[in-house]
Every structure is written in C-alpha cells, then in structure tokens.
Amino acid sequence: MTDFPTVPEEATFAEMGLLPEVARALEEMGFLAPMPVQRETFPRLMAGRDLLVQSRTGSGKTAAFAIPFTQGLVDPAHREVQALILCPTRELALQVANECGKIAQYRSLAVVPIYGGAPMGKQVEGLKAGAQIVAGTPGRVIDHLRRGTLRLDRLRILVLDEADEMLSMGFYEEISEILKNCPTDRQTLLFSATIPEEIERISRRYMREPEKIVLSAGSISAHEIQHAYYMVSGMGRTRDLVRVLDLEKPESAIIFCNTREEVGYVAEQLRKAGLDAEAISSDLGQRDRERVMGRMKAGNLHYLVATDIAARGIDITDLSHVFNYTFPESPAIYVHRTGRTGRAGKSGTAISLISPRELGNFYYLKLTYKIRPEERPLPMEQPSLTSPAAPITLAIELPAPLISDDEKLSELLRRLTTPAHGEVAEEWRALARRLIGRPDAEARIAQLLSEHFVAGSTRPNAITTASAEGNGHPRKRSRRRRDRPTQPGRKESPRISTAPIEPTDGREFWETWVDDRKPTTSEPNATRLFLSLGRRDGVTETDVEQLLARHGIVGQALELHTSHSYFAVAAEGVDPTIAALHGVEYAGRPLTCQKARR
C-alpha cells in the first residue's frame, strides 16, 4: 500500500528528482548512484512516514536521512532546530554533522554537533545562531534541554542513529526523556544494525505506525565479508595474535578488545613486536584521539587497537580487516565490529581468536546469524617474530625420541586425560584456573609435566611399544613417592607432589600448602577493598587478578561474589589502588573501588 513512487534499482541521483543544489553536493562528494538503504527510504521519508530501518554499519545510513533533510524536510527559511539526530558517541555525532553539512552546503542549512567532552560555549553559540539540524549525544542533548539552550518545540523529524548501540550503552532513560520533549506530530526514524526487543518496544511506544525496512538481516554473512577464526588456548593470546597478523598480512585493520586495559596492553605488545599499532580508548584525550584517527584515515597507521565504545563513530572506508582479539559478549556487538570492514560494497575480512572459554558466545553467534566462519590453523611460531637475542626454545627439553614419535606423544596425552579418581575437587580446578591466567602459564605447566613424567613412574623414556608377549599397553614401572609437608609450622617451601592423590576432596591437602600461603586480611596493615566487578559481569578470579596486575596492584585474599569482589592491600597502598581502579572502564561501564564496609 505505497502512496509514494519507488526508486528503481538502476536509478542515479540525477534521476531521483533531487534539487539542483542537493544533486551538485552529492556529485562533488563522489556519490553517483543511491545505495539500497537510500533507495528504500527516500520516497517514504519524503511522504512523511515513520521508519524502523535495519541496515548494517557502513551501508550509507547517514545520507539516507541527510538527503531528505536537504530535499525539503528541513526548511531553510526557518532558523530553528527542525531535525535532531541522536548518536551513541561524540565521534559519530561529529561524523554525522560533517556529512549532513556537506550534503546541505548549497541549501543554506546550519548543522551543529553537540556532544560531551567539548566546551558548552561554542555549542550554545551555534544553537543561538539558528541551527536547523543538530547531531548530538543523548547526555549532552539533555544538558542543553535543561539549560534552556536547546528547544525542540518546532522539531519536525527525530533520528535515532545506531539505536541498538545507544541502548546497549544504557541510554534508554535519556532517550525516553528526550522523546518526551519532542512534539507528538514529529516524524521519527530509527536506524539500527540489529533490532532487539528494546528497539521494537521504543517503536511501539513513540512512533506512529512505523514501517519496518529490513536490509541487513542476512548480510552479516554477505559475500563481501569473509569470516574466519583461529582456535587459541587463551594463554599467550597476544603472541598468537602477532603470529596471525604475520600470516594474514592485512593492509589495515582494527583490532577489537573487550576492555580498555586489554587495548593498552595489546597495542604495547604489538609495538614491541615491531608492528605499527596505536591504542584508542576512553582513556585517550581528544587531541591524541584526533591524532590517532588522523593517522588511520590518512592510511599511515597499520593497526588500530580499540574497544567497542571507542570505535563507535569511526568511519574508515578502506579497512581491509577486523580482528577480534577477545570475542564479543553478544552477536550484536560482532555485527557492529565486522561492519567496519567491507563497506560501500568493498570486500573485507573478519577474523576472531577463539579460546575454549569463548566457544559458547561463538556458537551463539553462528546460530543467531547462520554464518559459517572458516577455521584456519594457527601458524607455528616463527623465529622472525621474535627478537634475534631471544630465539625460540622449548620450555623443557624432552628426549629426542619422544619429540619425533607422535605415537608416544599421544600416549602421554592419553594418560593425562584419563581420569584416575573420578571428579577433581574444586580447589584443584580453582588452582588450575589461576595458573592458566598467569603470563608464565606455559612454562609452569611444562614444569609440572616434566615433574609428573620424569620424576614419576610415567617418565617419557619408559614409554614402550607393545611387544609380541605384551597386551599392547606400555610397561608399568614402580612409582617413587615424595613426602609432602604436613607438620604445622614446617618451614620448607611448598612443592607439588608427584604421588597419586587419594580419592578424597583434597581439602586438607589444599589448605596445608597448595594455596601457596596466600595472605589474608588478618595480617598486619592489610585493608579490605570493595570492587564493583563480579561473576554476573562474566569474570573469574583470574580475570580480576589480571586486572589488578595490569595496574601494578598486589591484591591479597581475593573474594569473587555475584555482583562485586573484595581484596586486600597493604595500608600504604590503599589510596593508590583506589585512584588506579575507581572509574576504570570494564566491559563498557566504569568500576567503583572503595574501602569495604565490613
């Protein structure tokens, strides 16, 4: 039931009936033909319809609403705010304002961006001078509404750009407050790469019979984006990333991390490996951010390491690759990350590093979007990726026959993976998790394997092939046992025994010495601190310990709860610890760190 003319697929901008000023601006910008989202939305917007548009990042959404603005939805004769575009980040607000300004340059329309982190004075001056199109972030828009420097009583059209991103960042209340300040007879547009239930709810509540246009439901697996992944152990992930980059050789890439702490660490490690990398996160000042983005857009920066929040609004047309250093927590985030490549019809590649802990999110992505990423073998470590002064060596030196005999290696692995006493006690699992998260985990595990096989009955050179008289199993040798320290007050350093563990829960063994004498808050000068990071954030004790370590904090007696954690530090380290952690962004939200109340 269309009451407007459609735009043919082969139509050019010149054949759309655009005003000469609009057509001239588009031609100077290098736009020759409308993209699908522009063809589908243009006649409907000009007819005054409310639209809910699902279209992937980089598909031309900004021009899809900017062209109708300049074609007549915004009247140049009235010097008041007639169009408001809400964006999740200041970078996207600036980008949208810039593109709207270019398209409207011959129509005498004033476009003003308003966003946080910039002086209010210049923005107020722009609004008072008669801004007609405003692109802003929800928080700063509300600031201007409360100050009375922004009035929306003459608003004709409201756009929510990257609506799913704004909701994921917790802007629902701000969006609702802004909508309540808008005239009820306005035209409303929602543009989003994904349409979750929250978007549907907003459309039902605040839009008038919206028409839904779906352009990207299946395009996450479109041919112009190639999806691939490498299975990694989770230990030495940065080293694995360097090896993958050396193999893939991308022309330019964004490397996504889940936290800003990871961003800084990864960028530093890449630079140490001799790669041209810069980090961009909320820690970066505006001047440095503009410098980094300037390098990326100019094509003289190879790798940009970023969080999802920091990368929102980044518009780089010729990005060849996107890498997921850590896999995102939801399929929608994956959509936005991969949308940074393969833009404007160009090809692109999205590559993820997947550890066992991330398999659940990875399979959920495949089920949600029906994609089939290609698994690629992780390349072996090459000498060219290390310093000449630090050649690659094995963590332990095994006998040459063992290294060359795959059957013997398989037998060792079989022995390690065959359960001997049923379920392993949780204390041992907790110790294993803490060990895996350490930077030196590979060397420590190699040491344990060496002690287990060489000092015990299953020493490598005891592995034999089946004889004619045997039953096909390796010969058994006597097992040497070590006495473990059990007497109270014994001074020897704890050592892990190679003797078989009795089928108990292991609690006495653990409490005696496996815990490595972890300090408790009962020690003198120890102060207990509260941290707003818990299991519901998807973290483990190892994750919290790594967070502390990245900030140079020596934590004691860590306790992980559902919504928060407790840990202790020496009295003199309380203030520096709180200063280092309070306000730190983790998984898209700032943390709270303070003295514990109990």
Image (spheres, grey):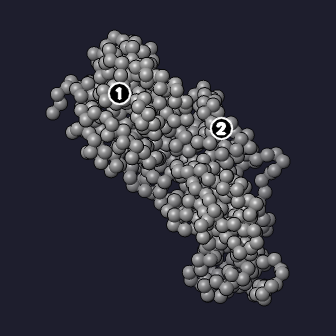
Q: Position of residue 345 (x, y in %)?
A: 43, 30
The quadrant of the rendering that contains the N terminus is top left
Three-letter code for the amino acid on which mark 2 is drawn: Glu
- What residue appears at the point 40 percent right and 20 percent down from the top-left corner? 130
> For the residue carrying disc 1, how many other residues have a C-alpha within 10 Å: few (<14), some (14-19), or many (20+)?
many
Dots 2 and 1: beta carbons under 8 Å? no
Q: Position of residue 70 (x, y in %)?
A: 34, 19
The answer to whether residue 123 is above or below residue 51 is above
Q: Secondary structure at mark 1?
A: strand
Q: Position of residue 317 (x, y in %)?
A: 50, 29
Q: Position of residue 501 (x, y in %)?
A: 67, 85
Q: Secondary structure at mark 2?
A: strand
Residue 157 figure quarter: top left
The answer to whether residue 289 is above or below residue 510 is above
The answer to whether residue 471 is above or below residue 516 is below
Residue 225 visible from this viewpoint: no
Residue 2 figure quarter: top left
- Identify which residue, 94 or 377, lies in the foreground: 94
The quadrant of the rendering that contains the C terminus is bottom right
Give the distance between the C-alpha atoms of the residues marked 2 and 1, in whole angstroms.
36 Å
- Identify which residue, 199 or 145, lies in the foreground: 145
Which callout, 2 or 1, points at the residue further toward the start of the chain?
1
- What residue appears at the point 57 percent right and 54 percent down from the top-left corner? 591
- Identify which residue, 320 or 328, lies in the foreground: 328
> For the residue carrying disc 2, how many other residues have a C-alpha within 10 Å: few (<14), some (14-19), or many (20+)?
many
Q: Which residue is mark 1?
A: 83
Q: In screen coordinates, is 524 left or right of 284?
A: right
Badge count:
2
Q: Which residue is mark 2?
A: 278
Three-letter code for the amino acid on which mark 1 is drawn: Ala
Q: In screen coordinates, is 296 left or right of 20?
A: right
Residue 109 figure quarter: top left
